[in-house]
Image (cartoon, rainbow, N blue to C red):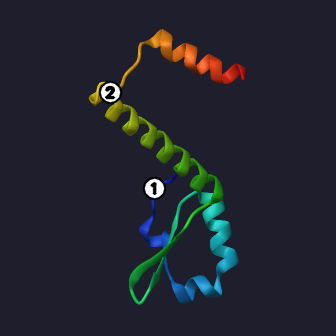
Amino acid sequence: MQRLRIDQDIRSMSEFRTGIAFFLKQVHETKRPLIITQHGKGAAVLLDVGEYEAMQEKLELLEDIQISIGQLENGEEIPHNEAKDLILQRVTK
């Protein structure tokens, strides 16, 4: 995801309402999120679908890593060969 440009990527709800098509195109082309404000405070974030999916994949990977670290800290690790065998059994089913 591209870095937010404050002068271009923060818009009020009324601006967003009147220019929805323009802002959708902007988000799609720039890959930057659009912050929508209401009464001067952040109310919503508009993201490109591809950027949203990439963000979700990264979060899932980080969650998997966190679970793995917890398992290691609790002594729940298994030897490499055993893990490999388990994975191969699942793949060949």
- Disc 1 to disc 2, how far (Cα)? 35 Å
Q: Amino acid at mark 1?
A: Arg
Which residue is rendered at x = 65% and y = 82% of the image?
Answer: 19
Counting from the top left corner in percent of width and height, residue 93 is at 72, 23
Nearer to the camera, 12 or 59: 59
Q: Find disc 1 in the rendering and name its residue.
A: 3
Residue 85 vs 19, above or below: the answer is above
Which residue is rendered at x = 54% and y = 14% of the image?
Answer: 84
Toward which corner of the image does residue 7 lie, by quadrant?
Answer: bottom left
Toward which corner of the image does residue 40 lie, by quadrant?
Answer: bottom left
Q: Find disc 2 in the rendering and name its residue.
A: 72
Tally of numbered tags: 2
Nearer to the camera, 43 or 10: 43
Which residue is rendered at x = 47% and y = 47% of the image?
Answer: 59
Q: Amino acid at mark 2?
A: Leu
* Dot placed on the residue nearer the N-terminal end, 1 or 2: 1
Residue 88 vs 23, above or below: the answer is above
